[in-house]
Amino acid sequence: MDPAYYSILHVASAMLLVGVTFQAFAAPTSERRKMSLMFSGILSIIMLIGGFGLLAKLHLGFPVWIIIKLLCWLGLSAMAGIAFRRPGQVGNLSRISIGLIVIALLMVYLRPFAG
């Protein structure tokens, strides 16, 4: 499959995951919990598959910036669940999420630690 398909899959699911996460921050009610966590998990898996598919197609190996991006993905994937457990901390969680998103974007565009 063309790397562009993996890229579109990865970026689209990342944008939707961010949207679902911030929707969970906006209204962490018990009525929305099941759907938010379900969509968050599905989008997280799709994002992971798209990212690793793209990594395999581009033959980049496993550089350090990918590991950092993977940690950012893991943190962002957990944020929706944490928002429902700690609704009083939504402000701090959203700041942490924005930080994780910025770090992930910096890793993609700057690719530090790449030889």
Image (cartoon, grey):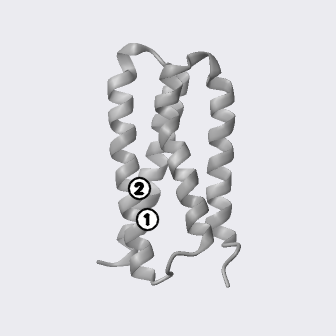
Q: Please name whichever residue, 52 or 15, is drawn nearer the observer in this view of the structure.
A: 52
Q: Are marks 1 and 2 in contact (CB under 8 Å)?
A: yes
Tell me if 110 is positioned left or right of 32 in this view: right
Callout 1: SS: helix
Callout 2: SS: helix
Q: Position of residue 28 (x, y in %)?
A: 49, 19
Q: Position of residue 10 (x, y in %)?
A: 43, 60
Residue that appears at 67% across and 38% down: 96
Which amino acid is tagged 2? Met
Residue that appears at 37% across and 47% down: 43
Residue beneath label 1, please? Answer: 51
Which amino acid is tagged 1? Gly
Which dot marks residue 47?
2
The image quadrant where one finds the N terminus is bottom left
Measured in 3D between alpha carbons, the distance from the residue under mark 1 to the one under mark 2, in whole angstroms, is 6 Å
Tell me if 23 is positioned left or right of 56 in this view: right
Q: Where is residue 45 in the image (x, y as percent from the top left)?
A: 36, 51
Q: Give the quarter of the image for residue 66.
A: bottom right
Give the answer, above or below, for where 66 lies relative to 101.
below
Q: Residues within 10 Å of mark 1 (few under 14, many from 20)?
A: many
